[in-house]
Structures are given as C-alpha cells and as structure tokens.
Amino acid sequence: MVKNVEPKSPPSRSAKILYKVRFNQVLGGRKYESTFTGNDMLTDVSIIRKSVSSLYKEGYFYTFMDQENYIQYQCREYGRTTALHTG
C-alpha cells in the first residue's frame, strides 16, 4: 500500500524528476522504499478478504477453496511469503 510520494528535484536541468515512494506491505506491515521516474508504470491490485477452506498442499503450492462459490485458489510458497493465483 502506498503511504507517501515525494518528488525529488533533478541535480541538472536535463534530468528527469524522481519520485521517492514509501510503501507498507499489506501483510506484516513491513516498510519498503523505491524511486521512480515519471515514465515508470505501476500496476493496480485489488485485495479482497474471503473465507476459504484449506484443501491440500502439493510441493510448494497450497490450494484453498472459497466457501461461497467453490472457486479454488492456489498459493505458491516463497520462503516465509506466498503469492496467490486463482485457478
């Protein structure tokens, strides 16, 4: 989640303006900073909380099922974090 955007003046007239962006992770709340130019594109994401049931684990993948509409979701484990994919 974006918390703050600060424009930074370029050191020379021909340089691009830089934007320092501060983020907070949705899960865990860790802080993250990155610098972008005006041409950099960021993608929007949607976050939805749902009640799901754990179905099974296969290798590095966990499979869950939505309790309302029975859609299955798959999460890949990356160390201590996971990435969610719809299936």
Image: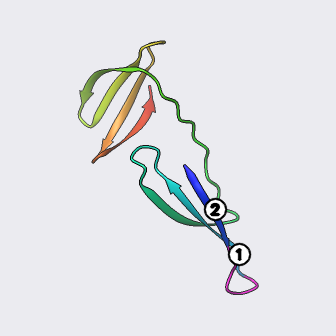
Magenta span includes 12:
yes
Question: In which image quadrant can residue 54 be found?
Answer: top left
Residue hosting label 2? 5
Magenta-colored span? 8-14
Mark 2: secondary structure: strand
Q: Does residue 17 appear left or right of residue 42 in this picture?
A: right
Q: Quadrant of the C terminus?
A: top left
Crowding near pointer 2: few (<14 within 10 Å), some, many (20+)? some
In this view of the protein, which residue sits in the foreground, 80 or 40?
80
Query: Vertical placement of 15 versus 81: above or below?
Result: below
The percent coordinates of residue 28 (x first, y second) are: 39, 47
Q: Earlier in the sequence, mark 2 or mark 1?
A: 2
Q: Which mark is residue 26?
A: none
Identify whether 63 is placed above or below 7.
Answer: above
Q: Which residue is mark 1?
A: 16
Asked if disc 2 and disc 1 are in contact, CB closer than 8 Å, the reply is no
Mark 2–mark 1 Cα distance, whole angstroms, equals 16 Å
Amino acid type of disc 2? Val
Q: Is residue 47 magenta?
A: no
Q: Position of residue 46 (x, y in %)?
A: 57, 36
Question: Which x, y percent locates residue 85?
Answer: 44, 33
Q: Please name the residue shown 67% across and 86% down the image.
A: 11
Magenta stretch, overall SS:
loop
Name which residue type carries label 1. Lys
Residue sitting at x 65%, y 61%:
40
Residue 59 screen position, x and y as percent: 23, 34
Q: Is residue 75 left or right of residue 56?
A: right
Q: Is residue 11 above or below residue 78?
A: below
